[in-house]
Every structure is written in structure tokens, then in C-alpha cells.
Amino acid sequence: MDLKTAILVFAVSCVFAAVLTQARGLPWFVTVILCAVVGIVLFGSMLLEKRDNKKSFAEAERFRAGFAFKSEKEERKYYDWCAKHPPARPSEDMKSDLISRYRAPRIIAELLGVLCLGLLEVFLFKEKAEGHSEAAWLVYLVLGLMILLLYFALSGIFGIKARRLYGMLSDRPDFQSIRRSYTEGAVIGHPVSYICLGSEYITLVTAKGVLPVRCSEICRVCRAIVLTAYYTNSAYTGSKESYFIKLYTTAEYRIQLTKPEMIQAYDLLKRAGLPADDTIDIR
């Protein structure tokens, strides 16, 4: 939020506070206190936003200059992380590997939800049987929710989405090359946002789909940082930095990773001889 917006919000808030306190018959100093609180919150959030933006852009400038770490301590942590998290090898079957990676931990929560809704359904059914007509519509509502939640859980268990995405890939004429490159590649990331570095294809896997990109068609590889600011009632409440690897052909592809994963993946892509660009895209 810029200074002009903050002043406008402050002025409107002060007028509103004055009208409210006068309508309630409160003393004048209550208006002063309310305006002071609004001013502290607004201008304090501006200072926090300015500080966080300064830190984020300073980190981006370090990346541009070739320094990926804020300090030697952070660099040591990164190498310790690399020792514990080397690039993983997919299983020998691409289909089963995708199914296992698309299984999210939320399946357990969904099954527990089905169990809780089932117990509630039994209780409501007994209430209905005893003549409590007001529970009748709740019986059908809870039953519908339970069926919906059970569908989501079973979809995850049997890998319906992963099977569908795999089926779409199998229709491609270069599918065998994609599968071979995937199973022989190295995986960096976490389900379901990871990159698989193969000899012929770089495969990007997200919650929305599986995107194989032919290595020979890649004309640029770079890192990107996206700065996201959060506001509540016009007051800045914090920011978040998201890290991406971008691949450019005739189109742009990107995959979101953590900062260590981004550095590790970029180093491997660069080592593989792809046209790596050390600049950083900042948005």
C-alpha cells in the first residue's frame, strides 16, 4: 500500500470514527484514540511492507550477482540439506510412480472425515426414527457430504487422477521416449510439484498435470522469484517468496519448488548443458 492510499484510508476511517462516536454519545477523546489506533496500524504496516520488500529485493540482487545465499551459515545448511536430500530416482514404472506421488497425506484426513460423518449419520438416523422430523434434511445432507468425501478419498487411493494423466500421455507419439526419459531421470521436488530431469525430456509434474518438455527444444532455463504481499482490511500483514524454475521453448513452462530445491535443480540443469541463464525473473 502506497502513502496516498494509506492517507485516504486513514482519513475515511477518522470520519467514520467521528460519526460513530458522536452517534453513540461518546466523549471526543474516544475518537482521538480510535484514529490513533488506525494510524498506528496503517503506517506500521507500511513500514513492515517496506522492510520486507527491501529484504526480498536484496535477496534477488544477490541471486543476480551469483550469490544464492544470505550468509555462510545458510550455505552450509543448503549443502547439509543436499546431503540428506539427493535427487531421487523414480520407480521403473512411470505409471505406478505417478500414482504413488499423487497420493497426498490428505487421504487420511478424508477417511477420518468419512468416519466422523458416518457416526453423525447414524445418530441423525436414530433421531429421525424417533420422530424428530427436523433431523430429516440433515440426514440427507450429511449422507451427501459423506459420499463426496469418500469419492475424493478413493480417488486418491486408487490414483484416478494420475491414471487419467498417464493415459493422456500415452496417446502422444513420443510417449515411449517420455517414459524412458522419466524412469531414467532424477526427481527434485515434492508431491505434486516436482521436476524430473531426464536425458531427452524434462518432465514437470504439478497438481494440474504432467508436462514433458523436450530438451532439444529448450532455449532458456532460469530461476524466478515471485513476491506475494498479503493485506487484511488494507493493512499489510506479511509477504511470501515463491521460487520457480522456468523453461522456455516457444512457450513458457514453470514449476514451483522450495528455495533449496530450486538451487539444486538449476545446478543440475546447468550441468546437463542446457542454456541456463543466471539472471533472476522477479515479479
Image: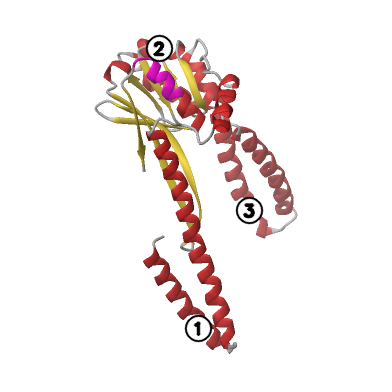
Q: Which residue is mark 3?
A: 138
Q: Is residue 97 above or below residue 38?
A: above
At x 61% / y 42%, what residue is drawn?
146
Which residue bears the numbered disc 2? 181
Residue 258 visible in rendering: no
Q: Secondary structure at mark 3?
A: helix
Residue visible at 39% across and 71% down in the picture = 8
**Residues at circles 3 and 1 in contact by the CB criterion of under 8 Å:** no
Estimate the x, y position of residue 132 in percent, counting from the top left: 71, 58
Q: Would residue 34 be visible to someone looking at this image?
A: yes
Report the quarter where the C terminus lies.
Answer: top left
Residue position marked by numbered label 1 in the rendering:
18
- Kindly report the secondary structure that dominates the magenta region of the rendered protein: helix
Number of the front mark, 2 or 3: 2
At which x and y percent is residue 150?
Answer: 59, 36
Task: Report helix, strand or loop for mark 2.
Answer: helix
Ranked by sequence position, the earlier of labels 1 and 2 is 1
Locate residue 14 relative to residue 279 in the image: left or right: right
Q: CA distance from mark 3 to mark 1?
A: 46 Å
Instruction: Tell me which segment is drawn in magenta.
Output: 265-273
First of labels 2, 3 by sequence position:
3
**Mark 1 closeness class: few <14, some 14–19, many ≥20 residues within 10 Å:** some
Q: Nearer the viewer, mark 3 or mark 1?
A: 1
Q: Would residue 43 be counted in the magenta stretch?
A: no
**Residue sitting at x 49%, y 27%:** 261
